[in-house]
Image (cartoon, helix red, strand yellow):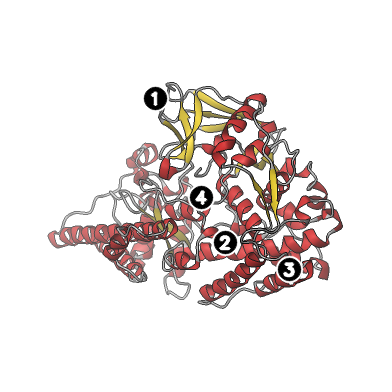
Amino acid sequence: MGKKSRVKTQKSGSGAAAVISPKEMMNLVSELLQSISAAPSAGKEWEEYTQIKALVEKIRKKQKGVSIIFEGSREDHFSDLLAWAQECGASTDGFTVANFGTEGYGLQATKDIKAEELFLWIPRKMLMTVESAQNSPLGLLYSQDRIMQAMGNVTLALHLLCERADPSSPWLPYIRSLPPDYDTPLYFQQDEVQQLLGTQAIPDVLSQYKNTARQYAYFYKLIQTHPAASKLPLKDSFTFDDYRWAVSSVMTRQNQIPTEDGSRVTLALIPLWDMCNHTNGLITTGYNLEDDRCECVALRDYKENEQIYIFYGTRSNAEFVIHNGFFFQDNAHDRVKIKLGVSKSERLYAMKAEVLARAGIPASCVFALHCNEPPISAQLLAFLRVFCMTEEELKDYLLGEGAINKIFTLGNSEFPVSWENEIKLWTFLETRAALLLKTYKTSSEEDRSLLEKPDLSLHSRVAIQLRLAEKQILEKVLASGREKRQQFEKKLEEGAPLPRYEESDIALLENSDAEGKLPIILRKLEEVEERPEEDSHLLNGDKSEEVVEEEKVSQDVNSNLDLDEKPIESKHS
């Protein structure tokens, strides 16, 4: 399989701090855990972040030089990765690992590959999964810790660290090939995170750092004190930098696959396949239960020496930055979130809520403003039309002739409620976009000037690119709103007849490929961006003192890793 890689634990030496006593480290970790156990006051999130950051940096300084590292560069281990994959029965013909500059390492075709050709398969025995963690030395602790049981992503991160520290681990060829560090916001300096202030990413970035710090403190104490952890290799070396690396490895690479019996899904790291970089397209990877392997077909035709890409899914650039650590310049799915709701104190609330309910839309919802045309979806158009309806218009959609069928037209741009309604909704959207633009501390022109600076750090550049992209979407919505408003003002002034909806149009609405013509009630509300508290119900039963600390950790510990896994998506290599 090639040369063996030696593992080295740094405990002192050049630039290393004196070894800290276990008691002193436990005190620092306890202080960190205590400092972030309570939710901050509204508007105090940045202040809390800086306090947590200061404590973490104090711990990192004390832990300097105490970590497990591999000798040699990452590139030195790719030949071992390919040899191991071949031994395990994975496909290794037709591609190799290559350096693609700013995109990092990726897969390069060594022969012509046709679109939809199966070129890569990875058998289950190569995967690191929650199940393989349960069957490893980590299994005993897993069986006794509710946080690990509730959160597969955390289990994978600890599994990765335990295997990294084991010289006999079967996954060492994979682990050695992983990046030594990442560009996720967990690695940003404080001034680089500050560049994200005002963006829609900042709440998640601050929460991600807070939750990672909390998890580290919790598991450091657990590993040092729990009898089931007494033989884990992490007991001797478990630094914040170790955990940050493992969290980022999982966060940028985790995917859902079916369990061996196909009865449910589990989280997995997929060696070699996760070297592929992202481009626009469609998901081309699936799981073959019959052969028990992950399979990937080519997204398009690839010529020899071209980079082989896959599609990570319909993520916004904010999601890419937060969870993958990169900004994708040509993201066809970029969007800005906008939260809208009908006020319960409004006189017409009940009527508006009822019309929205019939259309399958909540009275309060997070929608998306898109980078492409049209910038608003059929669902958002429908919501805004109802939001701006008069009492008479609401009655018409609730009680009028053909009221039930009229619901189908709410998201169709060809059938306005009235010219006045169209003017109101586009004026509202225009005003809202303008207000959102005012929340940024810099203008688009200033951001473009900053991006021209040659000495800008990579992380600052990514933050400014994201900031600028959000503004460009809002500016596009602003211009579109103004144009639409003027268009309908002209129609109203001219006394243009309102397009009439006929019952025969139902077929058109149901069968059209145009998103704007689909019946709202038959569509999934894809605009909802808020993620549910997926694991909050898992720590149930009687509350006792011994589980209080675990529950505090679990309340938002899950949000630091990407829980929005989609079957077979990936990361940036």
Q: Name the quadrant of the N terminus.
A: top right
Query: What's the CA distance linking mark 4 and mark 1?
Result: 27 Å
Residue tagged 3: 25
Mark nearest the camera among 3 and 2 is 3
Residue 28 pos. (x, y %): 71, 71
Residue 540 pos. (x, y %): 76, 61
Rendered image: mark on residue 208: 2
Query: What's the CA distance linking mark 4 and mark 3?
Result: 31 Å
Disc 4 on helix, strand or loop?
Answer: helix
Residue tagged 4: 324
Residue at left 24%, top 50%? 499
Query: What's the CA distance linking mark 3 and mark 2?
Result: 23 Å
Give amino acid for label 3: Met
Q: Return the disc, 3 or 2, that comes first in the chain's sequence.
A: 3
Between 15 and 92, which is closer to the camera in this rendering? 15
Mark nearest the camera among 2 and 1 is 1
On screen, residue 240 versus residue 478, left or right, reads: right
Circle 4 Cα neighbour tier, 10 Å, few/some/many (<14 / 14–19 / ≥20):
many
Circle 1 Cα neighbour tier, 10 Å, few/some/many (<14 / 14–19 / ≥20):
some
Residue tagged 1: 303
